[in-house]
Amino acid sequence: MDAVQKTRSARLMRWVMTTNHKDIGTLYLWFSFSMFLLAGGMALLMRIELSMPGEQIMQPLFYNQLVTAHGLVMIFGAIMPALTGFANWQIPLMIGASDLAFPRLNNWSFWLLPFAITLLLSSFVVGGPPPDFGWTFYAPLSTTYGPPGTDAMILAIHLLGISSIIGSINIIATILNLRAPGMTLMNMPIFVWGWFVTSFLILAIMPILAATVTMVLTDRHFGTSFFSAAGGGDPVLFQHLFWFFGHPEVYVLAMPAFGIISEIIPTFSRKALFGANCMVYAIIAIALLSFIVWVHHMFTTGVLLVTQLFFMYTTMIIAVPTGIKVFNWVATMHRGSISFEPAMLFAIAFVLMFTFGGLSGIMLSVVPADYQYHDSYFVVGHFHYVIVTGVYYALVSGVYYWYPKWTGRMYSMKLANWHFWVTTIAANFTFMPMLFVGLAGMPRRIPDFPLEFAEFNLIASFGSLVFGLAQLLFGFLLIQGLWRPKNVSGQVWDGAKGLEWTISSPPPYHSFMDPPKVVGKTYQ
Amino acid sequence: MINTIQDNHAPLLTVTSLLVCISVLLWAHDHPDGLGLFIGSVVLFSLEVLHWLWTVYQQKQANRLSSKRLTFGIMSFLWVVLVLMFAYAQVPLFHTACSAFGFNGKMVKHDHAHWSVGAIDASRTVKLQAFAHVNLLAPVTVSNKNQQLLVNPGQAFDLSYPVKNTTDQALVLRSVLSLVPSDVGHYLHRTDHAAELFELEPGEEKLFEASFILSDQIPKSIGTLALQFTLFNTEGVGHFGSSDAWYEIRSKKNHGVGLD
């Protein structure tokens, strides 16, 4: 009995103390998936409330609390950790490194997350009421009118920020120091490039967020007036600081996703990535431009006309490097020998629907049109197309692509195909009606709505429930896959190129202890 | 082989950083021992950081950590501190930019010696809509809130609003002026030199007055301009986070106190 307990505790301690990038990658991925289900559950509750006009299952205040928690947990607890999980697993394998540059910091970076999310949600149980002002926590809603649970949210954001910053430092140090001989920067896979640039973005914006939430905390409790007009401050300053963080944050989520798609499309098209160098330049251009577009979130706050024009044009210009990426993905598929494995299906759907989401963003960038769309459900539809059918699709696509490599086992293709089709149909049933009701004038962040929006809201709610069920199927097939035979070869996909495919599936616990020699253009 | 490392400080760093967060929460919510707990947890966290740095130093001495990686780690930390300072620097920069360029619907601070007014241009008029707004948390009433004037470019004009303190306590109000269109701040000059703060004795009613000159340089495209004073209560600023304050504010919001 003692021996059994000892083994169990050793197993547990392995996950607590591990500094192995594969272990930590696995922790990140399972944690993020559980947070995705949690925040997704919140979304379903909101959609049930919105399925019909009038009060259905909750009070308006609780609805607002769910809106806030859903946004924060999805962004900081689900999507960012999922991308970091991919980085943990893939970057060392793709550049021929044995681990990340700072393995202990990597452990700290992960273990901050569960505590931070617990702190974030703690005010639902103790020290509440929880925050109820949306994930953007605008002042004065979060300062003067912020409920007591706001403080736990602020400190949770500090912990999440520390985790992201440490993770980014680790990734940059790994890429700069631990590349295998012959793996030049321009020879790196686009996924690694995506994370490389993203890490710099995180280092540039996360401290801004940390400073902003600290100002909110001191405004609330320690007598400062950064954002309080009563004390000589200005709430508009909050919006500038928040969106200076917030807009690049969108690209923090998107660029590793671009990287995943740039790995998958060439594999299943059996062609080299079209314009690989241009893809790198496009990523850098998007990152730089992302710092000079933030005021497009604030067109209606009374900024000067010349300022509105400047930010409208810079926002539109971002479409150019993004368009280059979309063009290159399509050009890679052109005359390729395409096969439609689940990873490729999700990647193709990503290209279509992310572009759709991006184009609705171009609509929002036009100042006079933005005055109409601002704070409407059109915005909600727009960013869900970008984040769900964009970033989430890339993540799912990446899981289907690398799961056999990570586990040595192949999931059920049949179930994965079902997952794709149900998810894609349901996602469009969920988010397309949001664009329609938004254009018709339905404001966002409301638990009730006039009768004229009833039909489309019912369709969106129905779509969201089906979407949610499809994600349970995804979880099921991933777990079921762990019981399937371990018979996958190292190469897995015949068109795949890169160092990770040169080692066994699953890779040894310590891979590339002797750095491989990279000759020529490995990935192109 | 399991890659656990004996000198992994991550679990203790996680626990101590969480302790710091919890102690800040207690301190912010006026727990009697909040400050003490905060200092104690910061000390614990700092000790753990020092312990960790000592390990890093030992690794460096034993040549188990490359100088390149260590330098990168230190540079990254300094960069994060620099960006934090950059964020705080935005506070004065923002206010300076607002008063220098009229961003955010603010008055441009004119150099009085160089701000001249030409002759009154009687050939055209600008419609001026002036509003006074009372913030939710300011227990005062204002009469004659909405005023409309026709002003010739180059002409001086005055605004006045009777403000009444509805409480039995002295109040200090702050008036915040906002302009639409937001670039009109270049063409208005305030001449009354009144302070932003406006004091009222218990129950007192007093005139809140402001005087302006509209520049004769105002573009012909601006036919109407709106000017709003919002009155804020300076009492209690910076102490909004406790449960009591929150429930008090929410109840005011729900019962419409301050709104009319």
Image (cartoon, rainbow, N blue to C red):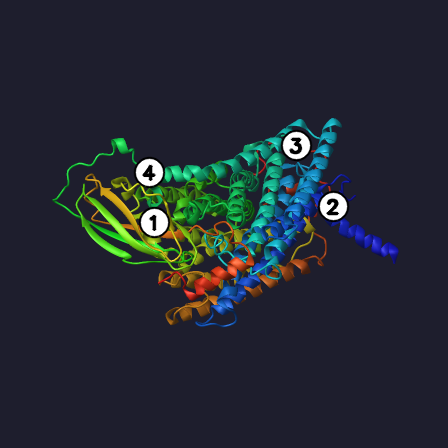
Element under label 2?
A: helix
Element under label 1?
A: loop
Same chain for the residues under marks 4 and 3 in the image? no
Q: Which residue is mark 3?
A: A517
In this view, the residue in front, A241 or A489, is: A241
Label located before the other in sequence (2 or 1): 2
Chain letter of the residue carrying label 1:
A
Give the label on residue B101, or none: 4
Chain letter of the residue carrying label 2:
A
Density class for disc 2 (Cα within 10 Å; few <14, some 14-19, many ≥20) is many
Q: Position of residue A131 (x, y in %)?
A: 53, 57
Is residue A276 visible in the rendered image? The answer is yes
Give the label on residue A17, or none: 2
Q: Which residue is mark 1?
A: A366
Density class for disc 4 (Cα within 10 Å; few <14, some 14-19, many ≥20) is some
In this view, the residue in front, B33 or B107, is: B33
CA gap, disc 3 and disc 1: 50 Å
